[in-house]
Image (spheres, coloured by chain):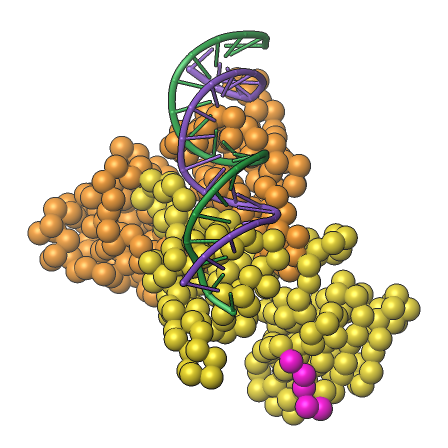
Chain colours: A yellow, B orange, C purple, D green
Amino acid sequence: MRSYGQYCTIARALDVVGERWTLLIVRELLLQGPSRFTDLKNGLPGIATNLLSGRLKDLEDDGLIAREDAPPPVATTLYALTDQGRSLEPVLKALGEWGRPLMVVEHAGDAFQPQWLAYAAASFAVDSDPQAAPVAIQLIAGDKPAVIEVGGGEVHSRVGRATAPDLTLEGPPRLVLGLLAGMIDVGRATSSGLHITGNPDVLARLGRA
Amino acid sequence: MRSYGQYCTIARALDVVGERWTLLIVRELLLQGPSRFTDLKNGLPGIATNLLSGRLKDLEDDGLIAREDAPPPVATTLYALTDQGRSLEPVLKALGEWGRPLMVVEHAGDAFQPQWLAYAAASFAVDSDPQAAPVAIQLIAGDKPAVIEVGGGEVHSRVGRATAPDLTLEGPPRLVLGLLAGMIDVGRATSSGLHITGNPDVLARLGRA
DNA sequence: CCGGATCCCCAGGGATACTG
DNA sequence: CAGTATCCCTGGGGATCCGG
């Protein structure tokens, strides 16, 4: 991208990460960890392959990501964030926080990955009772499951399944997020089509930050 | 901009503010307050007028800014941030924080406005001694002056002049920012061409956040 | 002079085909 | 699987023009 040509921290930042797709690539690497080209492509529906390879090259030149050669069994190259790339997390968190109200309406055809939702939920919540035993909330809102783990004052999200979830939420993304964010209550969620198993009381562990 | 088509808070946010120039327009309105079309154009060197008017229209449609009719003496329309627009400040702050290391090198020809620098300095500093009397630092790093005011635990920046600054820094932007950020010390700054008047000890009031 | 609208040109994005 | 090459088209940059 053409530089803004301004001696300003914000403009300088946008010179590097302001291009289309760039911050979403960082999001993907942040949530998924080191990823292959195809993994990134699948996580970024609609991106053209030439654009993806171009962006990866730019990000590498700017020191935000690094290529790793995966060990023999895989024998492919992985893209991973550097420390400087990882330091973009506060930016993505602020952006995600700001974008949360835009999620109340679900656009038909929008792609969806459960870890996006888990990250959104984890990023605005805190563990309201750090002394209590840790709990896990299983989210099933697409083909792939995700987990929110709360305990010791921390809230984390990851893809996959919990070994013994205290609560499982299964249903449309909008309802899962609505319930987690406290925008709707359990009664309304279930009557709207959300399937809840386990102990709904663990939702109280998610306090507003 | 074409939507990313993802049900993700970050992607949704970028759908709204991810286009070129958009966040810089918000920065301008945040730092300058309600502004006229021409003021924005002057603060955004290189933007095409059709782009600016288009962006302003989009931002208005999305509810981030509102047009105001200025009172009779001026009789022009002003653009001002709405609450939702102002709520983007954490995003800009995070971006600015991330972009600060990119400021160590000064690109020839980069446009510069002192309030950018004042904002950068104010956004990463805290008042290290809230009990002490408030102090004002006058920055002269271009044609227009800016002020950093520290007191009562808060750090604020604004354009203009302080009535009785405790410290005045005058010189190249890189040196002013370097000194404020603690990247260089007073001796090196003065010997490199920074002109300092007043009491340099007030710099100690700017603590790292 | 302010607040745009219009026009032209080109860089960059989108979609797909193709190759090591 | 991991890209590169190609083509098309949208959207940005730059200048100019026009109404208030």
Out of B209 and A147, give the one closest to the viewer: A147
Q: Is residue A157 left or right of residue B95?
A: right
Q: Position of residue B16 (x, y in %)?
A: 60, 46
Q: Position of residue A71 (x, y in %)?
A: 42, 82
User: Taking B143 as reference, is B102 above or below it?
Assistant: below
Out of B2 and A132, give the one closest to the viewer: B2
Quarter holding residue C6: top right
Out of A174 and B80, give the one closest to the viewer: A174
User: Taking B158 as reference, is A142 above or below it?
Assistant: below
Q: Residue at x 24, y 47 (%)?
A: B106
Q: Residue at x 39, y 65 (%)?
A: A65
Quarter holding residue B31: top left
Q: Tell which residue pokes out farthest to the right in this image.
A: A191
Quarter holding residue B172: top left
Q: Residue at x 55, y 68 (%)?
A: A39
* Magenta stretch, residue numbers: A160-164
The secondary structure that most of the magenta stretch takes on is loop
User: Taking A92 as reference, is C7 above or below it?
Assistant: above
Picture quarter with the N terminus of chain B: top right
Q: Position of residue B117 (x, y in %)?
A: 33, 47
Res B131 seen here: no
Q: Residue at x 28, y 58 (%)?
A: B181
Picture quarter with the C terminus of chain B: bottom left
Q: Position of residue A199 (x, y in %)?
A: 80, 85
